[in-house]
Amino acid sequence: MKSKNLSPLKMFMAMAAGHRPKFHFADWKDGFPAWQAAARPEVLATLGRWPERVAPEAHLVAEWEDRGIRKRRYLLDVAPHISASLQVNLPGKDTGPWPALLCWHGHGAHGKDPVMGNATSAAIRQNIVDHNYDYGHQMAGKGFLTYAIDWIGCGERNDNHKPHFFHHNHGRDWCNLYYLHATMLGMTSLSINLAHGRAATDFVSTLPEADASNLGVMGLSGGGTMTLWTALTDSRFRAAEIICYSDLWELFGIRDMNYCGMQVAPGLYSLVDLPDLQGLLAPLPLLVDIGAGDSCFHVDNATECFRQVQAIYQASGHPENIERDLFPGEHGWGGNLSEAFFTKHLGGGASPSR
């Protein structure tokens, strides 16, 4: 008798092993322009409905200096029924305007704080050391205005934290719970977070210190997810750095279960794999960081992902617009090419006066 499988996970792994997405670029015969034109609208449709835009009603709460970087905290409305805390890091003492970088954080307990260099506790300081995580602080020190908000479920918008104190998730990941809520309403966590990031960008673009014509976006891990989708859905961004978010969904997603509700959309893998999704950015200038010792997105899979994205950029006619920072480290920011990359594509980048 043929052996029977009672494992649902093995079922999904077998389904993924034989799966070819509809718009897998390697299978496409009609060239890059036709592929991008056909794939992009179907991919974007998976995001579902977006929250409505609202007036920001922004309030400057505090401004301080931290190791030569001027920092501001704002509270602003980002969609109906929800606000966010926005941190803006300003380079040195000059007035700008500076090219601006939206810095998305990855998964973790601290949200945007380590990214923006708010090393206010031993745990955050260690988080920064472990992942070279304070790119929002470091890049401000290199002459870029940087800004960040928390995704829903992280940092100050984690419902377990003060002042919310909701604990009836019983330890379950808020990302997955919010994804369930969002899809019930015809939305996704991605569309909600992207709308909130867009609202923050709308506001930052009004600041006299920001050069709104030269915007970039960068992020680590789950922040790489947000970087990818931000650049894909907002044409104001002129360059993107995806940090340690390169892999294949068959492997890191379905086999390893190394993803959550804030990274996915209904039917997305039926259309594209992750390299195809990244390739839809072409010809947008793209820097990809890969850690040779990354235990989250293994270098073998990350390198194959990059190879496929590189082939898409080659087919787009702009192979010069994709770069790789392969660094000898764990899951984190390589930081070796970022200043030169964003300076090349956005301008600025000179170390600010102190």
Image (cartoon, rainbow, N blue to C red):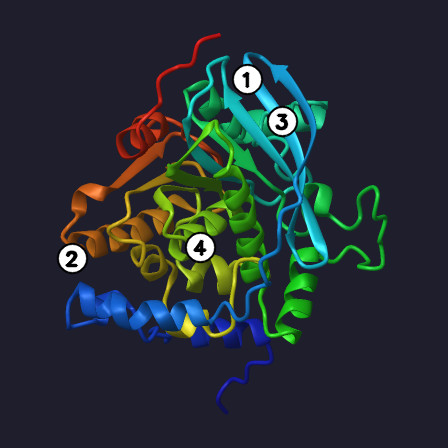
Badge 3 or badge 4: first in the primary sequence: 3
- Label 3 and label 4: CA atoms lie apart by 26 Å
Q: Quadrant of residue 229?
A: bottom left
Looking at the image, is mark 3 or mark 4 nearer the viewer? 3
Q: At x 47% / y 71%, what residue is drawn?
A: 46
Crowd tier of the residue under label 1, counting other residues whose Cα lies within 10 Å: few below 14, some 14–19, many 20 or above: many
Crowd tier of the residue under label 3, counting other residues whose Cα lies within 10 Å: few below 14, some 14–19, many 20 or above: some
Residue at disc 1, secondary structure: strand
Q: At x 61% / y 30%, what residue is drawn?
A: 114
- Label 1 and label 3: CA atoms lie apart by 10 Å
Find disc 3 in the rendering and name its residue.
Answer: 72
Determine contact: label 1, label 3, CB under 8 Å: no
Find disc 4 in the rendering and name its residue.
Answer: 229
- Label 1 and label 2: CA atoms lie apart by 41 Å
Instruction: Name the kind of residue labelled 2 in the image.
Output: Ala
Asked if residue 170 is positioned above or below residue 13 in the image, the reply reads above
